[in-house]
Image (tube, rainbow, N blue to C red):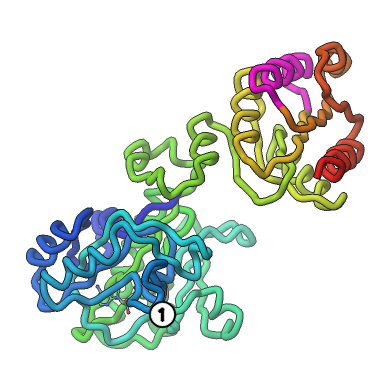
Amino acid sequence: MNIHEYQAKELLRRYGVAVLDGHVAWTPEEAEAAAAKLPGPVTVVKSQIHAGGRGAGRFADDPNGKGGVRLAKSPAEAKAAAAAMIGHTLVTKQTGPQGKLVSRVYVEAGCDIARELYLGLLVDRATSRLTIMASTEGGMEIEEVAEHHPEKILKVAIDPASGLSGFHARKLAFGLGLSGKQVGSFTKFATALYGAFQELDCAIVEINPLVVTGAGDIVALDAKVSFDDNALFRHKDLESLRDDSEMDPKELDAVRNDLNYVALDGEIGCMVNGAGLAMATMDIIKLYGSSPANFLDVGGTADAARVTEAFRIITSDANVKAILVNIFGGIAKCDMIATGIVEASKNLHLSVPLVVRLEGTNVELGKKILAESGLAIIPADNLADAAQKVVAAVKKGG
Ligand code: ADP
Ligand code: MG
């Protein structure tokens, strides 16, 4: 789950991470009042969307105008900047050409920037450790730095048993060319950020830029925080930070129904149990020349109700030209799944070809239920057979 910059900064502040003062504003008038509360003389008005590259982005209705992060020299200027952002669509490198609608801005104290650095924390699956990445190339996308100047990225892997120590932080600080009081300031910052990452079960925390101020302090000028969805049950209070308008409606629907669903842009809707089987199903669809419209793991407890919900979400996608059900009956028996498929197909008046491959407990009974349903369900015997049949159905239809 992703959150907005202003929400991330408010959370990080609680963990002792240095951020500047700021206020969220939903209207130009609120932005004006927010700017008046800040010390000034300069404030910064920042569009809040779940995408980076806002500074260099452009508004769809004003492509030659200024970007999504603007300096304001007075509350009146902050109001004007907010008016140019709120209700307008911001297009950045990360939003795609359709852009994202700005519904609120963050009005923040202006910063006296001496240097812009990069600091990121993530879980590195290769080492099974939390890894801290730092770079002197702040403000640039880290992917770009990694491609053109990999030597400019410093990495430190943290042993979960001993945690972050002063030694790690100093190694990064010296690598970033910090000196004097900046080193202590960085150590404090990195330690607080590491604590927040651990406590909040984050997946990624990215501070870009991390700034060295004219006075030698270290502060987070931007903050991207993404939580590990599988740990969200431990953080009920974070749920309220979810911005539904930033999510694909089908994915939101899936979250509410406890289904693991990721929308993709292909044409074959997939309903599978188990993430590994879902990945394999997507791969084999590709192999036979088509592409999946989604990743969907209905989980081990797939019953008729869940199958119906899953079908509803899959068929709400207009790109879906055929559906492939690939279920391995274990705890959820094949006859139960088959009944669910038949009920759902009838209730939802399914109009696209449906290929079903069942395997496992009570498979014969399951196949019988499908065959006797009177529905035009295409049965398949194995994964390759199923994929070939569903791809053929799509090619025939389209
Ligand atoms: P994005 O990464 O989406 O472009 P940032 O928050 O990183 O958005 O802002 C872009 C740039 O705007 C920063 O690199 C920095 O130069 C400038 N900026 C952002 N916030 C402030 C601030 N409070 N004071 C001064 N400059 C800022
Ligand atoms: Mg940034």
- Please check the rendered image and state whether residue 337 is part of the magenta-colored stretch, yes or no: yes
Question: Residue placed at 36% from the left, 64% from the top?
Answer: 223
Front residue of 193 and 271: 271
Question: Residue placed at 86% from the left, 18% from the top?
Answer: 367
Residue 390 seen anywhere in this rendered image of the structure: yes
Q: Quadrant of the C terminus?
A: top right
Residue, disc 1 = 138
Q: In what element is the residue under mark 1?
A: loop
Residue 354 image point, x, y percent:
79, 30
- Residue 221 image-quadrant placement: bottom left
Q: Would residue 270 be found to the left or right of residue 41 on screen?
A: right
**Residue 107 to residue 342: above or below:** below
Main secondary structure type of the part rendered in magenta: helix
Residue 144 image point, x, y percent:
55, 78
Q: Would residue 345 be found to the left or right of residue 130 on screen?
A: right
Q: Read off the magenta span.
A: 328-350
**Residue 227 to residue 58: above or below:** above
Question: Residue placed at 72% from the left, 46% from the top?
Answer: 267
- Residue 195 image-quadrant placement: bottom left
**Residue 280 to residue 85: above or below:** above
Instruction: Report crowding for label 1: few under 14, some 14 to 19, many 20 or more residues within 10 A (C-alpha).
Output: some
Residue behind label 1 places its C-beta within 8 angstroms of ligand 1: yes
Residue 112 image point, x, y percent:
21, 82
Residue 166 seen anywhere in this rendered image of the structure: no
- Residue 386 image-quadrant placement: top right
Q: Would residue 158 be found to the left or right of residue 103 on screen?
A: right
Q: Tell me which amino acid carries mark 1.
A: Gly
Ligand 1: give its quadrant. Answer: bottom left
- Please check the rendered image and state whether residue 46 is part of the magenta-colored stretch, yes or no: no
Question: Residue placed at 82% from the left, 26% from the top?
Answer: 358
Q: Would residue 171 be found to the left or right of residue 4 on screen?
A: right
